[in-house]
Amino acid sequence: MNEEEYIRQKMGERNPFTVPEGYFDQLAQQIIDKLPPAEEAKPKPRAIERYLKPLLYAAACLAIAVMGTAIYTNRHLATDQQQLAQQETVTYSDSYIDEAADYVMLDNAEIYNSLLADM
C-alpha cells in the first residue's frame, strides 16, 4: 500500500491546517510597521572609519607577514646552528702530526700518497 493512500485512509480528505480569516490581508502592513524607518536602517560610516579601516587591515596583514617571516627565519637559523653544533671540528697542531708520522715511520711522499688515496 502506498504511504499517501495510508495517510488518506487514516486522516481522510480534510485539511487539518487552517489560517485565521483576513490573516494575509493584514500581513504585509504588519511587516512594514515592524521595519525601522529608512533613515535609521543603515547609519553612514564616518569619513575616518571609511579611510582608516583599509589601513588597519593592511597593517594587520603586514604584521602577520613580518611575524611569519621572523618565525621562519628564527627556525631556519636555529636549524643551521644545530647542524653546525653537530659537526665536529678537530684541529691538530703540527707537532702532533710530526710525532704521529715519526711513530708510524712515514716520510712526506707516503703521507701525500695516503692523503690522495683518501680523496
Image (cartoon, helix red, strand yellow):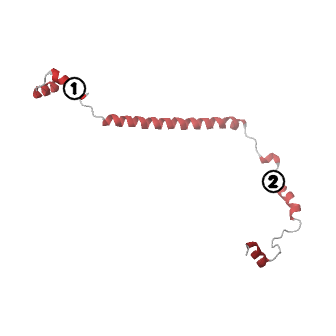
86 up-or-down from 2: above or below: above
75 up-or-down from 9: above or below: above
Q: Element type at marker 2?
A: loop
Query: Which residue is pictured at 76% across the width and 44% down the height?
Result: 43
Task: Inspect the image, locate mark 2, and give the three-letter code of the amino acid beneath it.
Answer: Leu
Q: Residue 14's image quarter?
A: bottom right
Report whether 116 appears left or right of 62.
left
* Residue 103 locus on image (x, y percent): 10, 28
Closer to the camera in the image, 101 or 77: 101
Task: Inspect the image, locate mark 1, and give the three-letter code of the amino acid beneath it.
Answer: Leu
Neighbourhood count class around disc 1 (C-alpha, 10 Å): few under 14, some 14–19, many 20 upward:
few
Quadrant into which the N terminus falls: bottom right
Query: Which residue is pictured at 85% across the width and 68% down the height?
Result: 20
* Residue 106 locus on image (x, y percent): 13, 25
Closer to the camera in the image, 24 or 106: 106
21 up-or-down from 92: above or below: below
Query: Which residue is pictured at 22% across the width and 27% down the height?
Result: 117
Identify the residue position indicated by label 2 in the image. 35
Question: Counting residues from the N terminus, which is met first, the one under dot 2 or under dot 1?
Answer: 2
Identify the residue position indicated by label 1 in the image. 115
* Residue 36 locus on image (x, y percent): 80, 51
